[in-house]
Each structure stands twice: as structure tokens, then as C-alpha cells.
Amino acid sequence: LFLAGVNRKIEDGACVGIHSWNDHELPQGMTPLDLPSDHEEHQIYLEYYEFIGIDPDFYWYTLEIADAQSMHWMQRDEFDDFRIDVTSLATDDVTLTRLPACDQR
């Protein structure tokens, strides 16, 4: 949902997490990465990412970096790598870091 924002703003200390999606209709033990890359389930997400102006490589990254039951806390360089424009609301030049507190939220 964060990606859909027109202006993406991040407070100092904010945790922005990403993970794979889960479809309870997939066979037991199967993940989205087990589906062929041209599968219709992927196409739904890829079309949406294109619609909101997000690099489709970011979609595949979210599937690889954390499964549906986990969370990967993004760092500043990841936003830059995928050309996701965010504005920091911090009063100084603070970079996003993975805070241990993110896991406890």
C-alpha cells in the first residue's frame, strides 16, 4: 500500500517492510516463486506495479527477500536501487536503517 502513494513520506525511525504474497489456494508448500514467471497471478501484480510506476524487478525482489510469513525491513539503498521515490521527514540527513524495534511492532 505504501507504494501506491503519490507522495511517499517516511518519518525518521519508520519501518517499511516487504514480503511475498500468499495464496491459500496454492498447493501446500508451494510459493509464488514456484509459479512460472508468466503465470496469471504474477501478471496481476506486474500490471499493478506498472500502473503505479514501480520497477517490475521490485516485484520479484519482494518474492525473493522474504516469504509471506516473514518481513524484510527496507534500507535507503533499496529504495534507491529500485528508483522508488521517498521523502524523508527527518529533520537531519538520517538514512533508513533496519531497527531492531521493527521486528517488535
Image: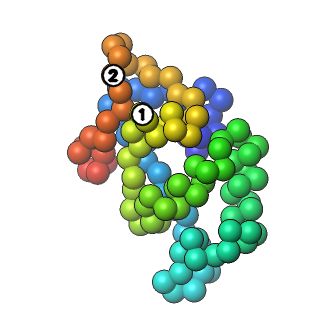
Label 2: few (<14), some (14–19) or many (≥20) C-alpha neighbours in 10 Å? few
Q: Position of residue 46 (x, y in %)?
A: 71, 55
Q: Is residue 73 visible?
A: yes
Residue found 76% across the figure and 53% down from its top:
47
Amino acid at the residue labelled 1: Arg
Q: Hey, which quadrant is residue 65 in on the image?
A: bottom left
Q: Is residue 17 above or below residue 70?
A: above
Amino acid at the residue labelled 2: Val
Q: Is residue 89 above or below residue 10?
A: above
* Label pair 1/2, CB-CB below 8 angstroms: no
Q: Position of residue 66 (x, y in %)?
A: 43, 61
Q: Which residue is mark 1?
A: 76
Q: Position of residue 75 (x, y in %)?
A: 39, 39
Residue found 49% across the figure and 62% down from its top:
64
In terms of secondary structure, where does tag 2 sit? Answer: loop
Q: Is residue 24 visible?
A: no
Residue found 52% across the figure and 38% down from its top:
81
Label 1: few (<14), some (14–19) or many (≥20) C-alpha neighbours in 10 Å? some
Q: CA distance from mark 1 to mark 2?
A: 10 Å
In terms of secondary structure, where does tag 1 sit? Answer: helix
Q: Which residue is mark 2?
A: 94
Sequence-wise first label, 1 or 2: 1
